Image (tube, helix red, strand yellow):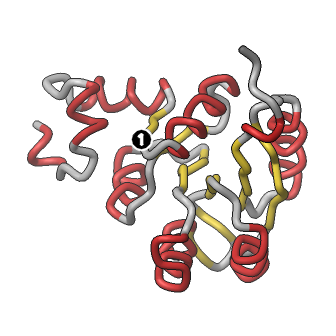
């Protein structure tokens, strides 16, 4: 059965590239199961908008002008407590230390820019339901660098150190 707009998950994007914000907003609006609330290009505007709009899921770029997505996420958690929305890291930086940094800071997933939009929408729903999500290229990176680690272990024990994974 098709999901109605009232069953959609509300999403807010923080990315310092205005073109990315416009493109992601346009693409996510094409999915009826997503309610794209808007975007912010800096952390000051993002903090205000997120506190006001109360999205269900955040998409946060790793590196923002003058700040980092993880820092914004930590400020939101400090200010909003348990009402802070879950976040998915959203970046073209897909090296393992970048992904691990976001996970160590409590984000619930990571989607590489350029990976499948359908996977991102599925990931948004997964994170909104309390799960964790990694796009396919991130899982491939982990499988390549840490062949002995299963996908289930990556998903369930996301805060493993590099030494523990080998």
Task: Name the side, left or right, on which 41 lies relative to 106.
Answer: right
* Number of numbered discs visible in the structure rendering: 1
In the image: residue 2, left or right of residue 148: right
Label 1: element kind: loop
83 left or right of 118?
A: left
Q: Quadrant of the N terminus?
A: top right
Q: Residue furthest top?
A: 1
Image quadrant where one finds the C terminus = top left
Whole-percent x and y of residue 159? 24, 52
Q: Is residue 127 above or below residue 114?
A: below
Q: Would you name the residue on which mark 1 appears?
A: 131
30 in relation to 95, above or below: above
Q: Horizontal and vertical percent for residue 86?
A: 52, 57
* Residue 71 percent across, percent down from the top left: 51, 75
Query: Circle 1: is it few (<14), some (14-19), or many (20+) Cα within 10 Å?
Result: some
Residue 80 location (% of width, % of height) = 54, 79
Residue placed most toward the observer, 49 or 150 = 49
Residue at x 63%, y 56% (from the top left corner): 58
Taking depth in this image into account, of 160 and 48 the one nearest to the observer is 48
Relative depth, front residue between 45 and 15 = 45
Residue 30 vs 18, above or below: the answer is above
Residue 157 as seen in the image, left or right of residue 121 = left
Q: Residue at x 81, y 60 (%)?
A: 39
What residue is rendered at 79% in x and 67% in y?
41
Q: Which residue is rendered at x = 28% and y = 26% of the image?
A: 151
Q: From this view, report whether residue 8 is shown above or below residue 36.
A: above
């Amino acid at each position: 059965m098709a999901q109605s707009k009232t069953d959609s998950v509300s999403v807010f994007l923080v990315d310092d590239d205005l073109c990315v914000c416009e493109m992601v907003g346009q693409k996510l609006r094409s999915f009826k199961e997503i309610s794209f609330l808007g975007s912010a290009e800096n952390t000051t505007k993002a903090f205000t908008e997120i506190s006001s709009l109360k999205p269900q899921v955040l998409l946060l770029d790793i590196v923002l002008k003058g700040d980092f997505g993880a820092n914004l996420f930590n400020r939101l958690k400090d200010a909003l407590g348990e009402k802070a929305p879950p976040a998915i890291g959203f970046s073209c930086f897909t090296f393992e230390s970048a992904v691990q940094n976001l996970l160590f800071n409590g984000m619930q997933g990571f989607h590489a820019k350029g990976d499948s939009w359908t996977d991102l929408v599925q990931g948004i729903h997964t994170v909104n339901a309390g799960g964790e999500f990694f796009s396919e290229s991130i899982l491939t990176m982990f499988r390549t660098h840490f062949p002995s680690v299963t996908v289930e272990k990556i998903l369930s024990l996301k805060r493993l150190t590099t030494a523990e994974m080998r």
